Amino acid sequence: MTQKIGYVTLLVREYDEAIDFYTRKLGFLVKEDTRIDEHKRWVLVTPPSNEGTHLLLARAATAAQQELIGNQTGGRVFLFLHTDDFWRDYENMRSKGVHFLEEPRDEKYGRVVVFEDLYGNKWDLLELPHTNH
């Protein structure tokens, strides 16, 4: 049996502002944007070369969900954006105003830097040492 994680839900304030951030600042593609009803949409975004997990942008529907926007993991890094060219993507994201929380660093597991999305969720931009160029 083959299994994979298909979607990861990311709570957002509004669909369009989230789509704008992920497509314009991170270069993601909108894979689907389907209206479910007058308040709800099914919005999937992914990096351009991704054939695996997609982000499901889910507008917070309750006060409890709204409180969790930007802190779905209690302040820890939430998602890991793997790259085959760290410096290309880092410079591109920086030029588009992405907020980095630190300077890039080399670790045993690869070259990494932590950045925030528009809501404050922490991400790692990560180039693994075995990545082919």
Image: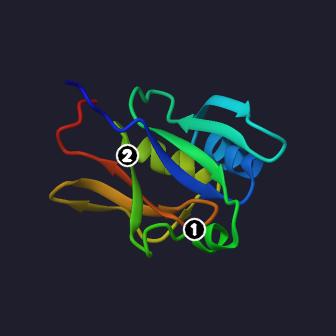
- The residue tagged with tag 2: helix, strand or loop? helix
Instruction: Give the Cα separation between the discs numbered 1 and 2.
Output: 24 Å
Q: Amino acid at mark 2?
A: Phe
Q: Please, is residue 123 above or below residue 23 in the view?
A: below
**Residue at 69% of width from left, 32% of height from top?**
33
- Using the image, tell me which numbered label, if any, was put on residue 70: 1
Residue that extends furthest to the right in the rendered view of this protein = 38
Q: Quadrant of the N terminus?
A: top left
Q: Please, is residue 88 above or below residue 126 in the view?
A: above
Give the image quarter of residue 41: top right
Residue 76: where, in percent of width, then height?
A: 39, 71
Rate crowding at label 1 as few (under 14), some (14 to 19) or many (20 or more) other CA atoms within 10 Å: many
**Residue at 44% of width from left, 75% of height from top?**
75
Residue 111: where, in percent of width, then height?
A: 28, 54
Task: Residue 92: tell me if it is visible.
Answer: yes
Task: Residue 28: tell me if it is visible.
Answer: no
Q: In front here: 34 or 126?
A: 34
- Using the image, tell me which numbered label, if any, was put on residue 86: 2
**How many labels sit on residues?**
2
**Residue at 52% of width from left, 65% of height from top?**
121
- Using the image, tell me which numbered label, if any, was put on residue 38: none
Q: Amino acid at mark 1?
A: Gly
